[in-house]
Amino acid sequence: KSESKTQGGWGEMILESILEKSGLRKNEEYFMEYQLMDETGKAIRSDSEGKKMRPDAVIKYPDNRSVIIDSKASLNAFIRYMEATDSEVQKKELADHVAAVKIHINELNKRGYDDYNKALDFVMMFIPSEPAYIAAMQGDSNLWNYAYERRILLMNPTNLITSLKLIEDLWKREYQNRNAIDIAERGAKLYDKFVGFTDNLKKVGKN
């Protein structure tokens, strides 16, 4: 409970588990711990931190753009809130939980993931605990807008699964379109061969 690194690893594990079950293919349509690169193949660094940009997950869209997901598990204040029996203590711990979520929102905003030219103009911040997500929303009804104004979408397991299913559907349509184009091109080549064959046959008949 007290180890933030362990909480972070747990959040990433939940995120990867959801991605594995989404129908998207690893290292094809989604990537874990993906290093963001510029046009020259050089690793992009965060302006605020100077560190290489390695978000927890990157999901590719059919139009060659990406959506970035970062998992943020901040559960210490939430656990204290759940364990508290006194209403005043609960109120304080809930406020601390909301404040912790806002800190993560601001940190994510500073990293500049949304400035990556191949990404959509927002970043998904994944909160792996459904109850912690709901509690934060109840603690501050404006929290979602607070994040959205900073180009961050707050996601819990349920709405992340829904979003991934929509992306999977986009890929299915993309592959269907590619197959249709491939069939049309092969059909055109086959037609050209038939035309050439009949022309040769006419020449044979004349001769």
Image (tube, helix red, strand yellow):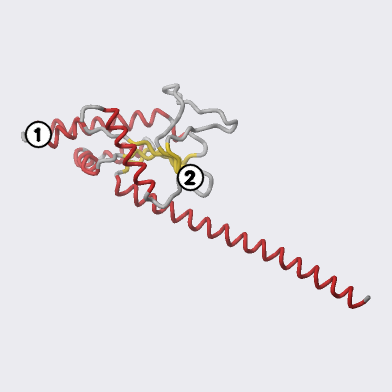
Question: Which residue does the numbered mark 2 point to in the structure image?
Answer: 60
How many dots with numbers?
2
Residue plotted at (89% across, 74% down)? 204
User: In the displayed image of the protein, which residue is found farthest to the right?
Assistant: 207
* Residue closer to the observer: 178 or 133: 178
* Residue closer to the observer: 20 or 93: 20
The quadrant in which residue 59 appears is: top left
Measured along the vertical axis of the image, is residue 52 above or below residue 168?
Answer: above
Residue plotted at (28% across, 30% down)? 6
Badge 2 crowding class, 10 Å Cα cut-off, few under 14, some 14 to 19, many 20 or more, is many
Which amino acid lies under the numbered mark 2 shown in the image of this protein? Lys
Residue 97, given in percent of the width and then of the height, sits at 21, 33
User: In the displayed image of the protein, which residue is found farthest to the top?
Assistant: 50
Residue plotted at (53% across, 32% down)? 37
Badge 1 crowding class, 10 Å Cα cut-off, few under 14, some 14 to 19, many 20 or more, is some
* 2 or 1: tag closer to the N-terminus: 2
Measured along the vertical axis of the image, is residue 113 above or below residue 47?
Answer: below
Measured along the vertical axis of the image, is residue 171 above or below residue 196?
Answer: above
Question: Which residue does the numbered mark 1 point to in the structure image?
Answer: 84
Residue 177, given in percent of the width and then of the height, sits at 55, 59
Residue 154, given in percent of the width and then of the height, sits at 32, 41
The answer to whether mark 2 and mark 1 are in CB contact below 8 A is: no
Which amino acid lies under the numbered mark 1 shown in the image of this protein? Ala
* Residue closer to the observer: 104 or 189: 189
| Label 2 SS | strand
